């Protein structure tokens, strides 16, 4: 059994506790056992699980795993702390706010002989799985992905990082990308933010990615992928799967702990995660450079 602690009791943290208390039957997730949770607040028991201190979590021999579910800005500190203590770590995306930091953390995990897993539930949704099937074998000519949502919360970082799930979609669908241009519009008084990134595939086909955040904006994705044979302008209908996306991710992480995931799959996943963070870095650099020139 892998005794586990959940760090951060927001939506994701509570779901992690729920899923470990009732794991998918006959799956690798049954090897996880939640031993406590950590929060900056003093809280009552959560789903029957008690709050413990960071010091306890780091020192206890029966705790082998940490689930980092804090705001993005606190990911690096928590990951590093638990890796240094020889604990396996599962972290909500993005694992870090720079590509270099993520490389350092992954190297540290390798040095300590433990698993570092970045959750990407957006790749596990039924509609994305169906979209990937629909896209397979088609040649992209031009693509567009526009995400909207309410104001970004403090601590979630630059939109290229807070919205890295959408970037991961594009990379998983169309392969490794390059950034050709990026810009940022912001009205702090009205909590408005819009990032636009121009990307290009290895086949030199253009992709536009927009993240737009403001009060009252619906949480939605608008897509337009034009291929040589057709155009896809909406997510395909997909049947709701019996196993939730967080549980699917929990099973995958547990399989990594048990050494059940092939090395080539682990290598491909690390390459994709680091590539997306490198793209996010570049988008941030170009956006901030443009904002400075406009000022």
Image: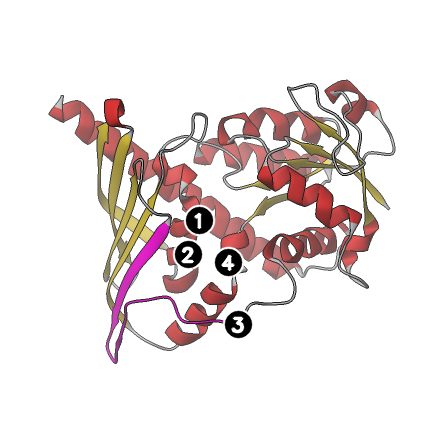
Element on which disc 2 rests? helix
Callout 4 crowding tier (Cα within 10 Å): few <14, some 14–19, many ≥20: some
According to the image, label 2 marks what residue? 169
Element on which disc 3 rests? loop
Q: Are marks 2 and 4 in contact (CB under 8 Å)?
A: yes
Distance between the Cα atoms at labels 2 and 1? Answer: 6 Å
Distance between the Cα atoms at labels 1 and 4? Answer: 8 Å
Q: Residue furthest left?
A: 294
Q: Residue furthest front?
A: 216
According to the image, label 3 marks what residue? 239
According to the image, label 1 marks what residue? 165
Q: Position of residue 171 (x, y in %)?
A: 40, 56
Element on which disc 1 rests? helix
| Quadrant housing residue 90 | top right
Q: Earlier in the sequence, mark 1 or mark 4?
A: 4
Callout 1 crowding tier (Cα within 10 Å): few <14, some 14–19, many ≥20: some
Q: Is residue 215 visible?
A: yes
Q: Are marks 1 and 3 in contact (CB under 8 Å)?
A: no
Which residue is depicted at the point 59% across and 67% down? 241
Which of label 3 and label 2 is nearer to you?
3
Which of label 4 and label 3 is nearer to you?
3
Q: Are marks 2 and 1 in contact (CB under 8 Å)?
A: yes
Which of label 1 and label 3 is nearer to you?
3
According to the image, label 4 marks what residue? 123
Q: Which residues are magenta?
A: 220-239
């Amino acid at each position: 059994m892998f005794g586990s602690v959940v760090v951060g009791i927001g939506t994701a943290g509570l779901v992690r506790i729920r899923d470990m208390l009732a794991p998918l039957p006959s799956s690798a997730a049954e090897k996880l056992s939640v031993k406590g949770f950590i929060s900056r607040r003093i809280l009552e028991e959560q789903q029957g699980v008690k709050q413990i201190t960071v010091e306890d979590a780091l020192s206890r021999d029966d705790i082998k795993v940490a689930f980092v579910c804090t705001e993005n800005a606190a990911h690096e500190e928590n990951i590093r702390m638990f890796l240094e203590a020889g604990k396996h770590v599962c972290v909500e995306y993005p694992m870090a706010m720079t590509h270099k930091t993520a490389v350092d953390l992954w190297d540290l995990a390798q040095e300590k002989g433990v698993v570092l897993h970045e959750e990407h539930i957006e790749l596990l949704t039924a509609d994305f799985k169906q979209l990937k099937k629909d896209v397979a074998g088609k040649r992209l000519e031009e693509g567009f992905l526009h995400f909207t949502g309410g104001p970004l919360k403090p601590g979630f970082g630059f939109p290229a990082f807070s919205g890295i799930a959408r970037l991961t979609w594009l990379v998983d669908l169309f392969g490794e990308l390059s950034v050709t241009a990026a810009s940022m519009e912001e009205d702090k008084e009205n909590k408005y933010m819009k990032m636009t990134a121009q990307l290009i595939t290895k086949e030199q086909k253009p992709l536009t990615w927009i993240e737009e955040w403001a009060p009252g904006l619906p949480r939605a994705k608008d897509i337009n992928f034009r291929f040589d044979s057709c155009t896809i302008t909406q997510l395909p209908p997909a049947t709701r799967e019996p196993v939730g996306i967080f549980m699917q991710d929990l099973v995958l992480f547990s399989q990594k702990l048990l050494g059940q995931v092939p090395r080539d799959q682990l290598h491909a996943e690390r390459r994709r995660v680091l590539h997306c963070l490198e793209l996010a870095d570049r988008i941030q650099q170009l956006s901030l450079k443009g904002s400075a020139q406009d000022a």
